Amino acid sequence: MSAQAAGQGLSPVSFSGWMRQIQARVEAALARLLPPGEAIPCRLHQAMRYASLNGGKRVRPLLVFAAGELAGAGAERLELAAGAVELIHVYSLVHDDLPCMDDDMLRRGRPTCHVEYDEPTALLVGDSLQSLAFGLLARDTAGDAARQLEMVRLLAHASGSCGMAGGQAIDLGSVGKELNQPELELMHTLKTGALIRASVLLGALCGEMLDSGQREALDRYAKRAGLLFQVVDDILDCTASTATLGKTAGKDAAADKPTYVSLLGLEGAREFADDLGKQALAALGGFGPRSRRLIELTDFLTTRKF
Amino acid sequence: MSAQAAGQGLSPVSFSGWMRQIQARVEAALARLLPPGEAIPCRLHQAMRYASLNGGKRVRPLLVFAAGELAGAGAERLELAAGAVELIHVYSLVHDDLPCMDDDMLRRGRPTCHVEYDEPTALLVGDSLQSLAFGLLARDTAGDAARQLEMVRLLAHASGSCGMAGGQAIDLGSVGKELNQPELELMHTLKTGALIRASVLLGALCGEMLDSGQREALDRYAKRAGLLFQVVDDILDCTASTATLGKTAGKDAAADKPTYVSLLGLEGAREFADDLGKQALAALGGFGPRSRRLIELTDFLTTRKF
């Protein structure tokens, strides 16, 4: 697929075809960008590849590519940005699954990293994937260095204590507590939303400079999409099976964690998700045909069953 | 202290005075650059500050400043670079001390982070400090963006699976094994050496561009200094007391980990350290008075008692 051609809104490829193309492209990029399993220390590198390859919907990379299309971005830079956000996401899963956190055995339908390898290795896998993610964003591709630096700053903020890791800290502190909707939203805005938002913004930063109005609209979209993703996740956590999800279902309820379903009920959560989907799409109104994949992806995120 | 004035080799400040000045400057910079303890999530931010402030010799920041002096670097950029390497170092200590790794209770004379807070918080502290470190290097200070990107790449490589984290993985796999000197050197080149080397190179990158011969000489210095630091650490681990070190002494021997002392004997390790110190100083030969602090620091690293 040429990002250029798709950017014109002329691609005859269906959404599911596009999604498969991007997923395959991201898989190949990650396989190339991760250190080979034969490089010393081999076991660590094999564990990094085990945790990162062959798995997941690659929602964040899809958002990077869809937003990149909006900004007419080239494929090489999009692959690095998509790889970076996905590695941050994977590192967070590996650390989240550790015994001292969620103590989970199953992820993407396979044993979690610390079960397949061991706990210290899984700890180092997460640490190393985070370093690699920043290394990818800083890779020299003869582009605009100031723009690349902005991307590093954005990802650092989205993944650190005022973003994803901060959201996990709030989550830890919330077990057994009743949160109201603003509190729950703050937790998810950080825990899931920050990286989803960063994916959209990073994708756009790979392309032509958007004007400030466009950036603002895209950011409005990105925030809604991040929350939408989490609300749907909460719904699926209590309606889908472990086999469908590829991870342990129902564990939030079991752990007495507050969710949108526990707060709004199943119907209320569904309505809230639909509403967020509409708001997200409304923010894309001014972008024309270039926003096609982002629109399709938003519909997919709203109606997904896994 | 003006880095400029010191760069001329004219500073009347003694080495120990200079060291205290830089340590205080780095402490103040970290206190300012870390999120305040009152910012949400407060507990995580307090734990990040607990782990990072009031502690340690700040060897890596000292190397950043000493190498920065060599290249005539300004203080603002040096503070960010010094803060970044120190946060990477602190994150590695926090994760290293976790029960699934070294399971250590004491660090810098105080309870380790997971003992003072809890295990999941310590995990997130390490993760968040790493993100923050990259954020600092990417901070917009109207400098040379391409140079900043080079610094991000350098730190990402030095801290990831082909650097510090990789060295820890080799260390994990080496317990109870006999390593020969090349194997032990590879482990330490990655585990400790990579970040020491990066500190020197980052400090130099904050200043004027060195020519390729100078960069090569400085890199030769940096590699020797990294190994020197570890050899002396091994010596101190079996000769100094826990109270002096502020961390558990003798734990490498107790854990049956290979060290330079177990390989070369105490006398042999001392000779090796002296030899590395001489080689490191020889590499600085061509830099003239601007290398004063780096020379003094090398002597300090060779003869330190804690």
Image (tube, coloured by chain):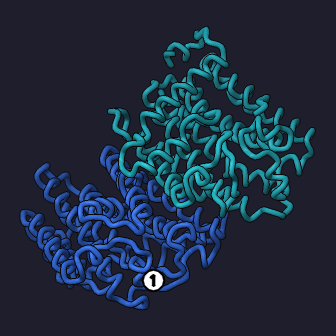
Chain colours: A blue, B cyan
On-image quarter of the C terminus of chain A: bottom left
Q: Nearer the viewer, residue A294 or A91?
A: A91
Residue under the image location 22 percent in, 68 percent down: A225
Q: How many marks?
A: 1
Residue B85, quarter of picture: top right
Is residue A83 visible from the viewing direction of this image?
no
What residue do we see at 16% from left, 73% from top? Answer: A277
The percent coordinates of residue A302 (x first, y second) are: 21, 79
A286 sits to left or right of A202: left
Q: Nearer the viewer, residue B84 or B203?
A: B84
Q: Quadrant for residue B65, please give it.
A: top right
Picture layout, residue A242 above or below residue B247: below
Q: Residue tagged by mark 1? A: A248
Q: Chain of mark 1?
A: A
Q: Quadrant of the N terminus of chain A?
A: bottom left
A192 horizontally vs B151: left or right? left
Please, is residue B301 above or below residue A5 in the view? above
x 44%, y 54%: residue: A134
- The crowding category of the residue bearing disc 1, from other C-alpha atoms within 10 Å (few below 14, some 14 to 19, many at least 20), is some
SS at badge 1: loop
**Three-letter amino acid code at the position of disc 1:** Thr
Camera sees residue B100:
yes
Q: Is residue B304 above or below residue A211?
A: above
Residue A60: x %, y % from top left: 33, 69
Which x, y percent locates residue B61? Answer: 57, 33
Compared to residue A298, the image places residue B190 above or below, namely above
Residue B144 is situated, as x and y percent measured from the top left of the image, at: 37, 35
Would you say B108 lies left or right of A229 here?
right
| Residue at left offset 59%, top offset 72% | A47
Q: Is residue B201 left or right of residue A226?
A: right
